[in-house]
Image (cartoon, helix red, strand yellow):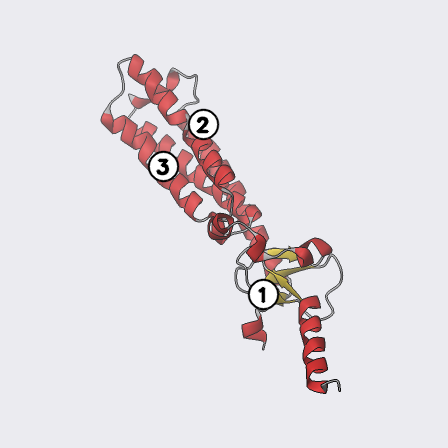
Amino acid sequence: MIDPDRIGNMQSTTQVAINSVDCPGCGARLAIPGGLAEQAEFICARCRIVLVNNEHLRKFRWMDQDEYVRKHGASRVNLWGGTLGSVIWLPIFFTVVGFQGKLTFGFAAMVAVPYLAMIWWMMKSRADASATLWQSKLFASIGVYFVYLGGMLWLVPEWNELFASFDSPNFLAIIGMGITFAAMGTIGALMYASKAKKLPAAETFEESS
């Protein structure tokens, strides 16, 4: 004899599987908002990442991803490759300045310490944001660094000569470039947040039950 309770449990499990997805951003199991159309956008209520209701998302399984990707938001190759690629200019720059006999500890610290701190912060925050939002934060952070660098070159004019060896723009141009990058990143982040605010939110099963 077929157990009605067992049939009910099977139907419930099937319905949950159909109406739920794993969030690619934080791994939460999400209940898709009722009546959401195919290809319609929504957000994860936990991490606020923008998602698209499509077959690709429904097939995604958080636990199928590499543990490192789940923890850091990117593979080792992408994360460390990008990080190393973004700092390789520092030793090259310091080597050239050193051969000219102009490299000082103060100058090296002024250039490198804030930049390395920024890169480390961006690397650690990769898992906490979508790729789009993270890129906006990266643009804004680089912009802030350029503004800082231009400001330091203005305060210590002799440091301008070290950058002049590379046909670099003067401190006003560097500050202007920094403001542009910071504005682009900030506008991108605000647009993402504004878009996410207008979309329906998919709650986790713990929150929606």
Q: Residues within 10 Å of mark 1 (few under 14, many from 20)?
A: some
Q: Residues within 10 Å of mark 2 (few under 14, many from 20)?
A: some
Q: Residue furthest left?
A: 105
Q: Earlier in the sequence, mark 3 or mark 1?
A: 1
Query: What is the number of the mark on residue 173?
Result: 2
- Secondary structure under tag 3 reads helix
Assign the N terminus to one quadrant of the image: bottom right
Alpha carbons under labels 3 and 2: distance apart: 22 Å
| Count of marks, rendered view | 3
Is the C-beta separation of discs 3 and 1 under 8 Å?
no
Q: In x, y percent, where is residue 48?
A: 55, 59
Q: Nearer the viewer, mark 3 or mark 1?
A: 1
Q: Residue 54's image quarter?
A: bottom right
* Secondary element at tag 2: helix
Horizontal side of residue 156 vs 77, given as left or right: left
Is 163 situated left or right of 80 in this image?
left
Horizontally, is 88 left or right of 204 in the view?
left
Residue 5 place in picture, x, y as percent = 69, 85
Query: Looking at the picture, does residue 78 appear above or below residue 189?
Result: above
Observer able to see residue 176: no
Q: Nearer the viewer, mark 2 or mark 1?
A: 1
Q: CA distance from mark 2 to mark 1?
A: 48 Å
Q: Quadrant of the C terminus?
A: bottom right
Q: CA distance from mark 3 to mark 1?
A: 36 Å
> What amino acid type is highlighted by mark number 3?
Leu
**Amino acid on which the number 2 mark rests in the picture:** Ala
Residue 184, by quadrant, is top right
The residue lying at 49 percent from left, 45 percent from top is 137
Q: In the image, what residue type sits under mark 1?
A: Arg
Q: Nearer the viewer, residue 179 or 209?
A: 209
Which disc is residue 116 wearing? 3
